Amino acid sequence: MYAEERQQAIAGLVTHRGRVAVTAVAERFGVTPETVRRDLAVLERAGMLRRVHGGAVPTGAFTVVEPGLGERDGTRTEQKRRIAAAALDLVPGRNGSLVLDGGSTTAALAEVLPGDRHLLAATNSVPLAARLSASPGVELHVLGGRVRGITQTAVGEVTIRELADLRVDVVFLGTNGISAGHGFSTPDDREAAVKRAMVRAGQRVVVLADSSKLGREHLVRFAAVEDVDVLVTDGDADPDLIAELERRGVEVLVA
């Protein structure tokens, strides 16, 4: 394989997986880590990726840009359905309690919550509240606060105060980015503050995120790796990052 062909293949892997490790790429293409680092340097100069410690991520991996809920609802829908189906095993039993964060992947879980058990569900999401209000067997608690238009979730002091009074069996969170160094992150500090309060409210913290979120770092961290008990993602997730998260105590379920 010519260097140019290998570099194009590496760029494709970064785009598809969200992150690649130097060692994994070297093994895949049968070259030395030094060769891979030179390839990454060429690709970075061409604006096709960004190098990070031990590997590379897409050029947009470090960002303060926040997609709207409508945009997220229309992307990677099949992966989100599989993640929601796998997360059903983590939903508490009869008379259990949970918090559902706003987002398209948590919305997929809300769609399939079992109706054969009594659950108390709290959410700060306007769309999720509408869905859960019609769900049999769900006693709904809507968290107050000022609603952000871009995410349609309540944020601010009121939301955080209400969460401070809650203690639930499981918190299901969405995220914009996941990395071993920066943890779980989101572009907006108000969203991050509410997510931190949700983490504190849960006896068990579960993050639902498709593989495109892995390897990305956004402006504000809301949870360190050690704060999360379970990550549910899809089969395209970077195996090296999964291994690092597991080494640090996160249970990773691949849907």
Image (cartoon, helix red, strand yellow):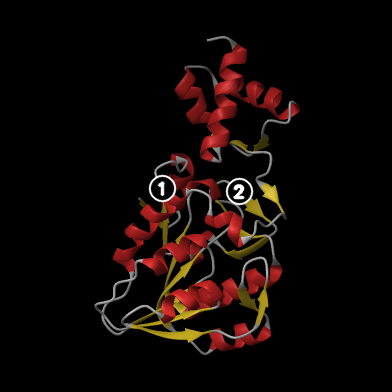
Q: Quadrant of residue 145?
A: bottom right
Mark 2 belongs to which amino acid? Answer: Arg
Relative to 255, is 55 on the left or the right?
right
Relative to 57, is 199 on the left or the right?
left
| Image spot of residue 54 (x, y percent) | 59, 36
| Image spot of residue 17 (x, y percent) | 51, 38
Q: Which residue is at 71% across, 54% downward?
A: 65
Q: Which mark is residue 216?
A: 2
Q: Is residue 247 visible?
A: no
Q: Which mark is residue 144?
A: none
| Image spot of residue 235 (x, y percent) | 39, 43
Task: Name the outermost residue toward the top.
Answer: 2
Q: Under tag 1, what secondary structure?
A: loop
Specify few, some or many for label 2: CA neighbours under 10 Å numbering under 14, 14-19, or 20 or more: many
Q: Quadrant of residue 33?
A: top right
Q: Under tag 2, what secondary structure?
A: loop
Q: Which residue is mark 1?
A: 234
Q: In the depicted view, which residue is nearer to us: 130 or 146?
A: 130
Mark 1 belongs to which amino acid? Answer: Asp
* Vertical relation: 28 (above or below) 193: above
* Vertical relation: 198 (above or below) 34: below
Q: Which residue is at 47% across, 41% downward?
A: 238
* Vertical relation: 74 (above or below) 236: below
